Image: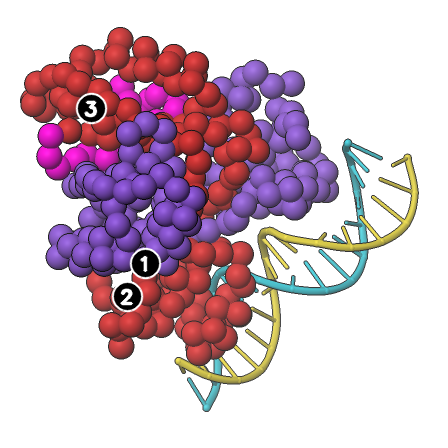
Chain colours: A red, B purple, C cyan, D yellow
Amino acid sequence: MTFDRIDLKILDILQRDATVPVARIADQVGLSQTPCWKRIQKHEEAGVIRSRVALLNPDALGLSLSAFVMVEAIEHTAEWRTEFLAVTETLEPVRDIYRLAGTHDFMLRVVVSDMPAFDAFYDTLTSKIRLRSVSSVFSLEQVKASTALPLSGLIANSN
Amino acid sequence: MTFDRIDLKILDILQRDATVPVARIADQVGLSQTPCWKRIQKHEEAGVIRSRVALLNPDALGLSLSAFVMVEAIEHTAEWRTEFLAVTETLEPVRDIYRLAGTHDFMLRVVVSDMPAFDAFYDTLTSKIRLRSVSSVFSLEQVKASTALPLSGLIANSN
DNA sequence: GCTGAAAATACTAATAC
DNA sequence: GTATTAGTATTTTCAGC
């Protein structure tokens, strides 16, 4: 699939603020409402727009501890990986799972309320799946948070 | 601020899918439309709901390389930190900035198209700010992605 | 705090150009 | 692609309990 400058601008607006009405988006990209709406529809059907969600404030809800947990597999087999994913996907605090290149095999982004909660999570994780190594990095504060993709560069190079 | 079970349920629905109409949310939490709408409004004003955004598919846009860059400050001063944040916040590929506890001082989540693009980012970063150490972890694939906070535990313990 | 209804806005789809 | 239209759904406000 290919995206022209207008597509990218539409997507960029929506990934920053999904409440902007189609009429205003159309204005900003220099289109009338109908074709603009059709493009958005197309991107939603194609899965380019995966979803529209509300972003919540973790601190307001007492979930202010983020941890990044890097793990090494105890054996590099398909079975271990399947098992690992089955376990981690069901654990509530695990928000993201990345498969890594390099020494470590996976990284988990974990969100909990405090250290005791992380400890509980750690116990559960290590009791449910065997790991060669685990190393965790703790975040005290998220200085910047953006779910938006960096599209500026793409827009600059588009037609 | 305090949240009852209904507040948490409303927030949980919205953080999964922000397109659900207020009428249906009201149904699901056992409220009529107006009080449900007022609660949502209140949460938006209080900043509990930070924003509503569209989540895009990185692969569809050719932004399939995520890297996590952990850096150590060359000196632990307020000036260095201000400088570091000023630099990183303006770099397009930097999506998230975490201030860390432990050996490393900050971690950046970086999104780029490919390794050459990461290389270019790395050059820019290290030319603009002095760092004691940098260690990067690369993600081949994001197995799970969720911007939602883990509210299930809170809902279970709420009134 | 709640209900119910009305008004304003936005979305969706179809039309002709 | 534009412009216009119309019907539907949703949001938002307002009165009263």
Above or below: residue B57 compared with residue B9: below
Q: Is residue A112 visible?
A: yes
Q: Are marks 3 and 1 in contact (CB under 8 Å)?
A: no
Q: Which residue lies under the disc numbered 3?
A: A71
Q: Amino acid at mark 2?
A: Gly
Q: Residue at horizontal 39%, vertical 42%? A: B77
User: Disc 1 residue type?
Assistant: Glu
> Mark 2 or mark 3, which is nearer the start of the sequence?
3
In the figure, residue A157 lies in which quadrant?
bottom left
The chain ID associated with circle 1 is B
Q: Nearer the viewer, residue A41 or A13?
A: A13
Q: Amino acid at mark 3?
A: Val
Q: Position of residue B99 (x, y in %)?
A: 38, 37
Residue B90: where, in percent of width, then height? 37, 58
Residue B64 at x, y = what percent? Answer: 21, 50
Tell me the residue that label 1 is attached to.
Answer: B92
- For disc 2, the chain is A
Q: Are marks 3 and 2 in contact (CB under 8 Å)?
A: no
The residue lying toward the viewer, choosing from A35 and A63, is A63
State which quadrant residue B73 falls in.
top left
Q: Which residue is mark 2?
A: A153
Locate residue A146, reporting x and y percent: 40, 49
Q: Is residue A88 highlighted in magenta?
A: yes
- When the figure is inspected, residue B1 is found, relative to residue A153, above or below; the finding is above
Q: Chain of mark 3?
A: A
The reply to whether residue A34 is visible in this rendering is no
Asked if the residue under mark 2 is in contact with the one under mark 1, i.e. CB atoms within 8 Å, the reply is yes
- Residue at 43% over, 70% down: A36
Marks 3/2: CA distance? 33 Å
**Helix, strand or loop status at disc 1:** loop
Name the one closer to the observer, B41 or A157. Answer: A157
Which secondary structure, mark 3?
Answer: strand
